[in-house]
Image (cartoon, rainbow, N blue to C red):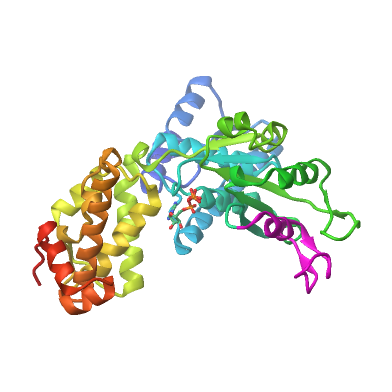
């Protein structure tokens, strides 16, 4: 080459576009120059008199990596469009994403733990999307249904199998065939269903209620809980054998207060989301509000952050997010150390303020809405020292 050597050219290319991969092809190889090329960011190094097949293999590798990178990027963008943010600056959460990505490629059962609102279902969906399983992602909340309903929800039933079974019903196991079944709040599952679930996990066969016909299912199981399972097992509320079966790959999602690095990104994300949804334009967030958002402990995790921002945007009317719209009990981030009475008062004060704001400080409408007399409302306003101005 004239004017520039290969290494310099490599540096120039990398400077212009860091994503371009470079394979150095050279007539004479020395270990030092190979090491230097790799140090400067070359993908690999090929010596001209080696078998050209090697070079083709290297090019294929680059192609595969690009494909993967592209898939990952589109997946992240798709998630964003759907309203999820799967990016992170936190080492702890990076680890979660790495384990999730590796686990996605297997069919092993995954057990997600973490406080309420940390995004357990969102990670479960992320794993399903990465798994490229062709079937659906089917979520079931084991707490929301009574024992009988949950059983028929999961396994389905034949017409007439019990009073109320007017029609045949396909259960969630069958619906998720070929895909992922996500059982949320698994710690709340009644023992009788735990036994059936264990059998289904072991045999990959289910039967609808009221039928003996075995139905084969091909499923990936993801389960989640915010309960202490060791405690439930000790108390006899959860079967240990089932616990071992579902816990092949455990993933613990850290609470938001353990990944504060991500707060600015999430705040930005939800501000954008609710600006779009409410068609409001936010021009300014008061410093005190931003300081609060960045320092609060979020016992309700991402769900709580989302709700706070939604509320702030709904209540703001001139493009400014003001401190007065922050709820009292959230201003006090140590509210978990309050007595029940103190907590009740804070929540009551907050609710009265919110209602007054929603009715433009009209006390007739607000007291009607709250179901108290206007006089009682005035008493509360003075008791709680509520000073709202239009
Ligand atoms: N990564 C995220 N991006 C955007 N929103 C999120 C994210 N994680 C959580 N949320 C918000 O928080 C809410 C709660 O998330 P999710 O239902 O996944 O939590 P969970 O851990 O399963 O909670 P629970 O234990 O109460 O069921 C979601 O509906 C969503 O609005």
Q: Is residue 85 left or right of residue 224?
A: left
Q: Which residue is drawn at 14% across and 51% down?
A: 288
- Report the residue at 26% width, 47% height from top: 341
Whole-percent x, y for residue 313 in the image? 26, 66
Q: Is residue 52 magenta?
A: no
Q: State whether residue 363 is above or below residue 96.
A: below
The residue closer to the viewer here, 23 or 380, is 380
Q: Which quarter of the picture shows residue 110? A: top right
Q: Residue sitting at 68 percent across and 46 percent down?
A: 221
Above or below, 69 against 280 in this view is above
The quarter of the image holding the C terminus is bottom left
The image position of residue 270, as x and y in percent, is 34, 59
Is residue 336 shown left or right of residue 198? left
- Residue 164 colored in magenta in the image: yes
Nearest the viewer among 379 and 299 is 379
Closer-to-camera residue (111/374): 374
Question: Which quarter of the picture shows residue 101?
Answer: top right
Compared with 12, 385 (above or below) is below
Q: Tell me the magenta residue range.
A: 145-172
Residue 23 is at least partly visible in this image: no
Residue appearing at x 63%, y 35% in the figure: 249
Q: Which of 226 and 250 is in front in this view?
A: 226
From this viewpoint, which residue is outermost toward the right? 213
Please determine whether, in this image, residue 350 is positioned above or below residue 330. Answer: below
Residue farthest top in this picture: 31
- How many numbered circles are shown? 0
Where residue 71 appears, as percent x and y from the top left, is 56, 53
Q: Residue 364 placed where, x, y %?
A: 18, 79
Say if residue 231 shows up in the picture.
yes
């Amino acid at each position: 080459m004239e004017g520039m050597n290969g290494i310099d050219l490599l540096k120039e290319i990398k400077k212009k576009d860091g994503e371009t991969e470079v394979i150095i092809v050279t007539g004479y190889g020395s270990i030092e120059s190979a090491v230097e090329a790799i140090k400067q960011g070359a993908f690999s190094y090929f010596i001209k008199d080696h078998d050209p097949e090697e070079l083709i293999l290297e090019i294929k590798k680059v192609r595969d990596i690009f494909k993967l990178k592209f898939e990952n990027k589109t997946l992240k963008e798709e998630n964003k469009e759907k309203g999820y943010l799967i990016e992170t600056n936190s080492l702890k959460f990076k680890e979660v994403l790495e384990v999730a990505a590796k686990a996605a490629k297997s069919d092993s059962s995954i057990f997600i733990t973490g406080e309420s609102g940390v995004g357990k279902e969102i990670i479960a969906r992320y794993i399903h999307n990465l798994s490229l399983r062709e079937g659906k992602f089917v979520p079931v909340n084991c707490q929301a249904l009574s024992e009988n309903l949950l059983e028929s929800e999961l396994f389905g039933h034949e017409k007439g199998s019990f009073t109320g079974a007017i029609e045949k019903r396909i259960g969630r196991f069958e619906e998720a065939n070929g895909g992922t079944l996500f059982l949320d709040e698994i710690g709340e599952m009644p023992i009788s269903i735990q036994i059936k679930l264990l059998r289904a996990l072991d045999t990959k066969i289910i039967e609808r209620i009221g039928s003996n016909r075995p139905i084969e299912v091909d499923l990936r199981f993801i389960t989640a809980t915010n309960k202490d399972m060791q405690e439930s097992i000790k108390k006899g509320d959860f079967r240990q054998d089932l616990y071992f079966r579902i816990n092949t790959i455990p993933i613990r999602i850290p609470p938001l207060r353990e990944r504060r690095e991500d707060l600015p990104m999430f705040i930005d994300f939800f501000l954008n989301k609710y600006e779009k949804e409410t068609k409001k334009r936010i021009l300014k967030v008061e410093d005190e509000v931003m300081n609060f958002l960045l320092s609060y402990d979020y016992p309700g995790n991402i769900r709580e952050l989302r709700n706070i921002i939604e509320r702030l945007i709904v209540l703001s009317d001139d493009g400014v997010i003001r401190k007065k719209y922050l709820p009292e009990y959230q201003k006090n981030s140590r509210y978990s150390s309050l007595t029940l009475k103190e907590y009740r008062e804070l929540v009551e004060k907050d609710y009265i303020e919110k209602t007054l704001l929603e009715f433009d400080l009209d006390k007739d409408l607000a007291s009607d809405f709250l179901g108290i007399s206007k006089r009682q409302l005035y008493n509360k306003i003075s008791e709680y020292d509520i000073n709202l101005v239009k």
